[in-house]
Image: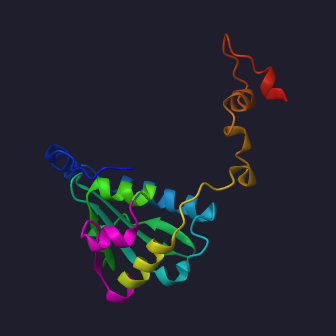
Amino acid sequence: MIPDFTLPPIFATIGEKLPQFPHGLMLCAALNIANKLQLLANQDLTKLENKNFCVKATDSGGNAFFTYKNGFFTPIFNYANSKIDLTFVAKFSTYLQLLTHSENANTLIFNRSLILQGDEDLVNIVKQMLDSVEFKLPDLQKFGFANTLNPLKFMNFLNINLPGFSNSSAQK
């Protein structure tokens, strides 16, 4: 359970002065991985095609700008000249609550913790999408990540031998 908290104002002061494009890169990478792992499998993402989004974390000073094109979430580098179709506005803790599913999207929106601003039809589409996303751990073995599930197997996979640790059990 993620508590509701507000970062100290110094974070926003510093965060606003930092380049914003890394936030978009990281968010797009996470969304594309979630899509690849079929965490967004029930979503009709074509409704987001060529739409521009901004995710603002009010207490961190961070903004992530991205779009959805040709089946991929892509960062927007020239966001100053882009028309944003939908903006998400919330504190950092609210995004953590949404990500960990400790609060559902409808509750956060109803309590005005998460604000969606922009095209009304797009707001409704995204509200429905956020509400229907099932946050479940995917079957990592299906995607070739089986060795990461057991630390000893993973160490063996990387050919790491640490004193005091036996990789013989990882060979089984």
Residue occupying the far right of the picture: 172
Tell me: 104 left or right of 56: right
Tell me: 103 left or right of 16: right
Residue 152, percent across and down? 70, 27
Residue occupying the far top of the picture: 163
Q: Quadrant of residue 43?
A: bottom right
**Image position of 9 with respect to 81: above or below:** above
Query: Is residue 127 located in the magenta-colored stretch of the structure?
Result: no
Q: Quadrant of residue 24?
A: bottom left
Query: Is residue 118 located in the magenta-colored stretch of the structure?
Result: yes
Residue 47, percent across and down? 50, 84
Residue at figure coordinates x 15%, y 43% from the top left: 10
Question: The C terminus appears in which quarter of the rendering?
Answer: top right
**Pick the front one: 17 or 166:** 166
Q: Quadrant of residue 41?
A: bottom right
Residue at figure coordinates x 17%, y 44% from the top left: 8
**Pick the front one: 110 or 22:** 110
Residue 39, percent across and down? 58, 64
Give the colour scheme of this rendering: rainbow
Residue occupying the far bottom of the picture: 121
Residue at figure coordinates x 47%, y 66% from the top left: 74
Start-end of magenta stretch: 103-122
Tell me: 50 left or right of 37: left
Count of all numbered marks drawn on residues in the image:
0
**Pick the front one: 27 or 133:** 133
Residue 101, percent across and down? 44, 59
